[in-house]
Amino acid sequence: MKKSKQKTKAPLSNRQLRVAAKNKYLTLDIVDFLGLAAIFVLGFLIYSNTFNSTFHFDDVDHLQENLAIRSLSNLRAMWDYSHTRFLAYYSFAWNYHFSQLNVWSYHLVNLMIHIFNAGLVYVLSCLIFASPVLKDKPISKDKKEVAFIIALLFVSHPLATQSVTYIIQRMSSMAAMFYLLSIVLYVMGRYTTNNNKQKYLLLAGCGLSALCAMLTKENAFTLPFAIILVEFFFLQSGKNSISFKDYRVILAGVGLLVFIVLGFVKFSSFISTSFAIDSGSTDNSITATNYLYTQFSVIVKYIQLLLVPLNQNLDYDYKLVHHFSDARSLQGFFILLALLVLAVFLFKKQRIFSFGIFWFFLTLSIESSIIPLQDLIFEHRTYLPSFGFFLCMAYGIYLLTWLNYKKVGIAVLVLLIGANAVLTFARNSVWKDEVTLWSDVISKSPKKARPYNNRGDDYLEQNKLNEALSDFNKALEINPKFAMAYYNRANYYKKESKYDKALDDYDMVIHLWPQFHKAFSNRGNIYKLQNRLDEAVQDYTKAITFSPTYYLGYNNRASVYIMQNKNAEAIQDLNESIKLKPDFAEAFANRGLAEMNLGNYAVGCMDLKQAVDLGFQPAAEVMARNCK
């Protein structure tokens, strides 16, 4: 008896699978727009209390006092300030252009970047779930729901606050934006098979976005490896998908090798360098080795904070680990090794978990490996790696509940995202001002010197002198070699006209930190008050030598030159000061006075008028006496 032939469908090729994935996802519909709108609303609500939060910590040096961002056209100054963070500083220059130092615009841009990143997380998750490797998995049908959950976890998690509310850490979120966008464009380009022009445009956009990421922050240098990770995990479904006879594969391999060599050249000097730990810690100097030993436990701390985001801290009191045999190092190493082994074993059957773990380690690798950084732990370093964590978390809840207990899964996720939102809103309130922020740090790191010093500095600005002195003394009690605490206490003594004590503290600062230009300049100010003019000039000159762009140093030295009747020398210094800071009113006033001393009354009056227009009222008295 002849058996009837039953027609069977041939398995889909990679090309067909990508076309299918394209048809399934790459066209946005009303569901996508509603999901993105919900992400936007949630993000805006939980960060709505940040728009008036003040500048903090590194914001002072890198934003408030950074002359390089004062002009959009001064690209060279921004490039010289930081090659690998040029685009971040250029974005700050746009903020300054429109709102000067009004904080609301900086916070608004930071928040928009964060919300946009959550949208990219949504798109990338959908693309991953629509990949050829996952086409037969249930997740392929529920991809948009799960991607929406991942994006909500990303936008709401409290650990992101340091990358969003702390203005200077736009560097982390902005680099993540270009990083994620590059991968999204790459995957979309790979899914595009029937339109070569569109494909190459997408891949060109991928390359451009990658370059932008690398010009925003150094951790973006892992991007080529992240693209390989996505390709290997989700886009290669056949055994022979990659052919080493294909010239494109060879070119990609050569390009990657060149990139690795350039990366090694870029970071090798950092790896071989040791330096004193920042923040007034009593620890010894950091090396590549002891930094790595410490990072084993730091990474475990990051995972714990992602799981249970409680007791967050801007400035953790984390001790340097000097030996691998230390219990903290050994424990962290074996936990991380177990996670990596688990990722390898999960590759075949649970590829999403495996990918999430590898993504987490890869994107954290530059800041938490053998490249020593002065601060051992910072929450903003988890911003990009957190995508891998949330991918695993959402997929785990999906597997446990979606098929049989979907309502339970939804309830768990609503509670989780709601709790995150509440914690994030509460955490943002801590960033209200310097006193609230550093008081929070002191409550969690009471044995660390830097929080007391930084809170004292803010008290000093508010003219709360007793509180300021108490904090400076406490910082020096914890660490008698903390240069910044001596510097700030010297500023306090100067404000109180206790010049001898101020000089003693400035001397100590210079002993501990021989190239700190502000200490020389401020000591010069006291010498000037004591009429020790030659010593003042010497200190101002050293300040300028150690920091050639320090506009105050030129102005201060010029003011002494005027007292010494060296008006021509004063004008040269004041020209340099005004060149560095074109809106520096006091320099215009001093130049006007020097010009008048030389008999150039018309020119002097013009400078004095400019000083008055810029808000320097003492110049008005000189004008009234000498200008008609």
Image (tube, grey):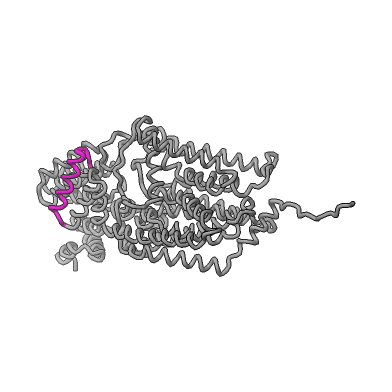
Counting from the top left corner in percent of width and height, residue 230 is at: 57, 48
Counting from the top left corner in percent of width and height, residue 627 is at: 19, 66
- The answer to whether residue 327 is left or right of residue 216 is left
Which residue is drawn at the image coordinates 42% and 60% (left, top)?
417
- The answer to whether residue 287 is left or right of residue 385 is left
In this rendering, does residue 158 appear at all?
Answer: yes
Residue extending farthest to the front is: 1
Picture quarter containing residue 202? Answer: bottom right
Given residues 265 and 166, the one toward you in this image is 166
Residue range (magenta): 463-483
Which residue is drawn at the image coordinates 30% and 45% (left, top)?
316
Which residue is drawn at the image coordinates 85% and 55% (left, top)?
4
In this rendering, does residue 575 appear at all?
Answer: no
Instruction: Say whether residue 53 is magenta.
Output: no
Given residues 494 and 22, the one toward you in this image is 22
Asked if residue 449 is positioned above or below residue 400 in the image, the reply reads: above
Instruction: Say whether residue 467 is magenta.
Output: yes
Asked if residue 432 is positioned above or below residue 61 in the image, the reply reads: below
Which residue is drawn at the image coordinates 49% and 50% (left, top)?
388
Counting from the top left corner in percent of width and height, residue 75 is at: 42, 53
Asked if residue 50 is positioned above or below residue 512 in the image, the reply reads: below
Q: How many marks?
A: 0
